[in-house]
Each structure stands twice: as structure tokens, then as C-alpha cells.
Image (tube, rainbow, N blue to C red):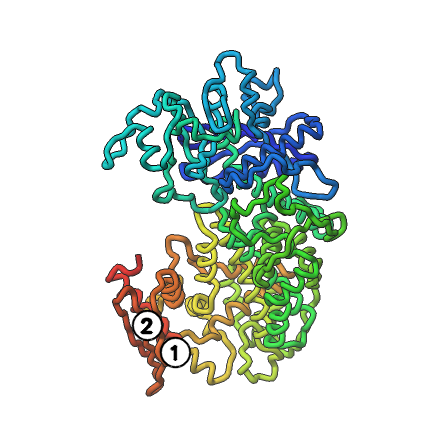
Amino acid sequence: MELKQDFECKVSVHDIVLAIRTELDSEIVDTLSATSFDVQRGKLLLNLIHIQPIQLSPEEVENCRRFQTTLFRILLNGDVNKLSVSDDFSLGDNPEIDYLMLPATAKHQRPSNSIIDWDSVSSFPFSSKRTGDCKNHACDVRIQNGLVCSCQLENCVVYTPHTRLIYIITRITDWNGNSTLNRGRKGTSTYKEYYKNHHGIELRFEYQPLLQGRSVFKVGNYLLKARQKKKKGQNMNCAELPPELCSVIMSPISVSTIYSFSFIPSIMHCLESLLVAFNLKKMLLDNCTQNDIPISKVLQAITAKECQEAYDYEYLETLGDSFLKYVVSQQLFKTNQNDREGALTNERKKITSNVALFNFACSRRLQGFIRKETFDPKQWDIPGDKSKSLLLKQELVSGRTSAYVRRMREIDFKIIADVVEALIGAFISTEDEEAAITFINWIGIKVDTNIIPYERPRSIEPEQLEHVKLLESQLNKYSFHDPYLLVEALTHSSCKRPEIGRCYERLEFLGDAVLDNVMTMHFYKEYSNEKWSPKFFTIMRSISVNNECYALSAIKAKLHKHILCGSVVENQIAATMKGVEKLSLESTFGWELETYFCPVLADVIESIAGAIFVDSGYKKEVVFQSIRPLLEPLVTPETARRHPIYELHELCQKRDYEMKEHPSDRVNNETSVTIEVKANGITFKHTEKASNKYTARKVAAKEILKQMKICKYLG
């Protein structure tokens, strides 16, 4: 593992040898090599290079496991009581978490020497007897372990019993016990006086050079999406230490080696996660697709937001949710041609609910692949550490895919449902809808791409009911093969004309799902990059895919003139038109107009989309091309505006403001709504009257946001 610092630091990183029994798949190597790790000062870059197999004897394996276990116990626990020479470091017969991480020699030394730095590997257990090998220095430095050569102290780890702390020795100073110690406001003293007064220790070898030690490196989670800021008081703790108060734990081992190993838990957690994703990918390839799906997409799909890492399943879940709704709606529309919209909607909810997706996932044992916890380095399992069980239980998940299980976890059913949608989204993000449909069928939801003729009664020529050619000209000149579909798309259930067999409800049900999917894919392709967060992508989608925007589009296109309906609905549409006749319709967003929209206006946009979808032979791209002119201008990041009700709720949750909506009153055909927000001791309150509660709430929220903006409470 080649490590490279993309930041300035007094301590450099060294390469590390990762030894495993089985060669890693090239995709895992490439994906891990493309990963960077956010540290406090910048980024740590990693590159994996395959080297020739290394033969290790059982004794060498034990030494390696002893070395890495000791070093990680120091880094993660800092407790000398957990350091033991007598621990069992042999390999067992049962499957367990097992790989070796060893310090590498410098690159210029490798052609003639081993790539493994065996001197560092042998640094534990330390023995003062080994100092006899030094021919350049006398063994005349007194430490708690006995007499040693000074060169043994230049790169070592020591424990100071009087403070119960572990230090990394960085150099031997020119000072001794009689040198002056400047203690700032507390004045000065000699080191000898300091240790006597503060620790009750009388230095016996006061002329020995002091050792400069620094505290052990903090091991962090370097996978977090936000770079970790250095907390106050986290600066390097340095001290000058009398050798006689130090007990050497490891020697020789350089500060750079120890620093490099402080990043290993995050790197190995990333590798372990990739191995989980790779195992799931094999299962998907066995059952769902012959086309390759990047392991990075699989990993993203199984990573919950709770992990707080750079990538999680939010983008993919939105894609998968939209596509699942689309294919299930299409299937129900085709196979239940006599069911009305209400029955179709209820059936879709049963199939795509979180509870249903949870059950589908568990039937395929997908829950075991999910990553849902923030990585805690202190809970990381040190390979070779037998102080806690690392034994694994092998279970066959599917076909040739086995999983190794060590512990049980509790996972919220919604997270499991989200991962199902995210895995669907992973296929969709690679433009492989066929594989997504195969996966949906594999988990237990039966859908297909077969085209079934749409049967319904008809008894009159469409042109006698609607101006078909005029309407087609507004749909990007789409020409209907079956114009009666357009008539059905514009017929409300209140229309009692016997020559019209069906209303638009079924087409609305289908068109709602199709429009949602094509708009979602449009925004994903345009804005799914590092510049835009998944949350912003969701906002863009919600701004565009809603009834108010659809209704505004219908009004702009004058579709209200073509709707076939009863007198009650006609009056509702007329009331809407009266409310907007003096308003500018330039806005992209219906909710920016402080008026009420009859829901039928939004319905016909969806039903026309459904009609085009059926008429074109179930081609989504034709729907988008035809409907897009009605929806223009589409929202962009520059024009995006949140719905005031959602924006106010989100603001109050984020800032912990208290929001209260008083009970509404209806007097003289007007509904009165009062919203009150308490923010840091200041109360913002507004009462709004409108023809309906929804409009009153919308305008009241909008006014509250204006007040808060004036008072600079929006941030």
C-alpha cells in the first residue's frame, strides 16, 4: 500500500505491506486505490500495487501478528495492561478475520532486501539483551528495562509508569536532569527539581540525556464526509523524559511507521466494506444480470446515511424509488384493465411499501450486506488479536455466494427497504433497466416489459369530442395513433356523456408514475455530481414533480378549455381561472402564486402523459419529449425555490425553533390559518385568509419566512 500525503506535515508516511492469503480482485484494488481519505490537514492518497507472493513460516506469521496487534493496541487503546508477550498469535483452523499489515522497507532498499521491514516487526517484545549487537555505542543508558545502547532509544515507544502514558520517542536531546525547564508563568526550575516536586521522584541518573517524546497519534475515522477539525486541546503533547523513568515497549520502530499505521483502521474498514459489496455483486451477477455493475455502485447502495461517509444510498434510493413506482404502475395498469385508479393505487402501495420491501429483502437475505453504523476505530477488530473472538460462521446466501457472519445487528426496517430501492437505483444509474427489472423480479415483485393491448369501449370519433390536431401541436407535434386515448385523458369522472366509456383516472395513475420517473432521470443526469448534494437533487425533483406546477402548466397551455367534466368541476376550474387572471404566470412554480388550483388541472397533465406512454408503445423518452414543452421552463439550480411550508418546517427542525400552527377557522367561505414561530426568544406570527386551508397555510408560511429574513433568522 503506497501512501501519499496531499498535505504538509512534519511526519511523513511510509508504505505498508498488506499480506492476505487470497489475491484481491482487480476491481477491488482499483476502487480502493481511487479512494482518498480526509484527514485534518488535507487528503491521504492510497495506491495498491500487487507484488510477488511471500512465503512466511509459522514463526514469522506469529511475529507479524504479534507486531500488528501490539501496535494497534497502543494506537487504539493506549493501555499497557493489554500488551502481552504470552498471547496466542498462531493461526487457527477456523475462518477468522486474518490479514497482516507490516511496515515496508524504503523503496531504494527493496531490490536487495525484503520488502518487509523485519527490524520493526521484531520490535516487540523489546529486550535490552539485543543492544549487545551494537558496535558503535556502549550500553550505558539506564532505563527501567535495564542498560541499553542510546541507538535503541532513537526510534522507540516507551511507557512512563509515573504518568501511565505512552510516548513515541522522536530524538535524544542535548539536555539532562540539570537543564533548565521553562514552565511559563510558573517560572523555571531544573528537570530534576520538577520531577521531585511534582512526581516525588528523585532522579538517580541526572546526567543522562533526556528523551523527547510525543503522545501517540490519535486514530480517527477518515471516511467521514466532512473533514475532521482539530478540537481545542488536541495538539501534539510533547515531553522531555528522563530515560530512567521510561520502559521501552517497542524498538526499533520509527515515528513515520507509527503515523502511517494510524490510518490503517480506516483503510481496512474501507477494504472490508468493498469485500462485502463484492460478495453482493457476485450474488447479483448470478441472479440478476450478466452485465457488469461497478462495485462502487453496489457499495454506495448498501451504505446508509448513518455511516456519515462521502457517498451513501440517497441518490440511488431516489432513482430506485421512482423506477420501482414506474414499473409496478405499468404492470398493474396492463394486467388489471378493469380496476379503477383507487384500486390500482392501493395495490401499488401494498407492493412498494417499506414493510413489503423489507420482507422481500429479508427473503433474499440482503440485510446482512447493509452498512448502517458510523465507523468507530476503537471498535475495529484488530486482526490476530485473540482477546476477543474473531471467529466467523460461514453461511450460504445464494448460489455460489457465501457470507461470513460474526455478530447480530439491529437494522431499522426502513433502512432495509431503502437499500432495496438503492440497489434498483444502482442498476438504473448504469443505464441497465433490464437488469433492474430482473432484480425486482428476483426479490419477489413480478413485473415485465410485455406490451398488452389497452382495451376500453368506444362509440364515437375522437374529433367529435376534442380538437385533436390542436392539442397534438402543443405536445411537441406528437401524433396519436389512437386519438381516443387523448379524449380519455381529458375526461373527468363527473362527465356523464354515454358515448365516452372511461374517465382519465387510470391514465392519470400511469402518467403520474411515468412523469415522476422521466423527471427524476432528467435531474439525475443533469445534477448528480459532487457539486450538488443528494438533498439538493431531491429538492429539485420535488419542486418540479407536484400538482401545483402541473396545474400551472395546464393553465399556460389552456388545457382547461378541453377538459370534459360536470358542472361542479367546471365551476371549480372557473374559480381557479378567475384567481389567476390578474396574476403573472411567468413563474415556474405554482406555489409562488398565492391562489388555489383545482386538482383536475394537474391530473390532466399526468393523464396526457399516460396516454402518450400507452400510445407510443410504452416509450418513456417519447413522453418526456412530448410533455416537456408544457413544463418549460424546467427548474434549474439558479431558479430553484422551496415550497414555503416545507422550507419553514425544515428551518425550524434544523435550528430547533418552536413552530406552532393554530387550529384553522372557516367563516364566510374563507379559511383562516395562523402560524407562529419562536426563534431565540423572538416570536414571528402571521394569520392568512384564503378560499381553502392549503392556500392559507402556504401564504402564512411564506410571510413568516419573509419576517425571519428581514430579522436575519434564515441564516
Is 125 placed above or below 367 here? above
Is 292 placed above or below 189 here? below
Foreground residue among 558 and 643: 643
Report whether 81 appears left or right of 640. right
- The structure residue drawn at horizontal position 54% and vertical position 21%, both measured from the top left corner, is 106
Amino acid type at image mark 2: Ala
Q: Which residue is mark 2?
A: 700
Which residue is outermost to the right?
Answer: 399
Q: Position of residue 40 (x, y in %)?
A: 41, 39
Which residue is outermost to the bottom?
Answer: 668
Q: Which residue is mark 1?
A: 693
Q: Earlier in the sequence, mark 2 or mark 1?
A: 1
| C-alpha gap between disc 2 and disc 1 | 10 Å
Amino acid type at image mark 1: Lys
- The structure residue drawn at horizontal position 40% and vertical position 53%, both measured from the top left corner, is 637
Foreground residue among 436 and 335: 436
Residue 267 in view of the camera: no
Contact between labelled residues 1 and 2, with CB atoms less than 8 Å apart: no
Foreground residue among 315 and 4: 4
Quadrant that contains the C terminus: bottom left
Q: Position of residue 189 (x, y in %)?
A: 27, 30
Residue 604 in view of the camera: yes
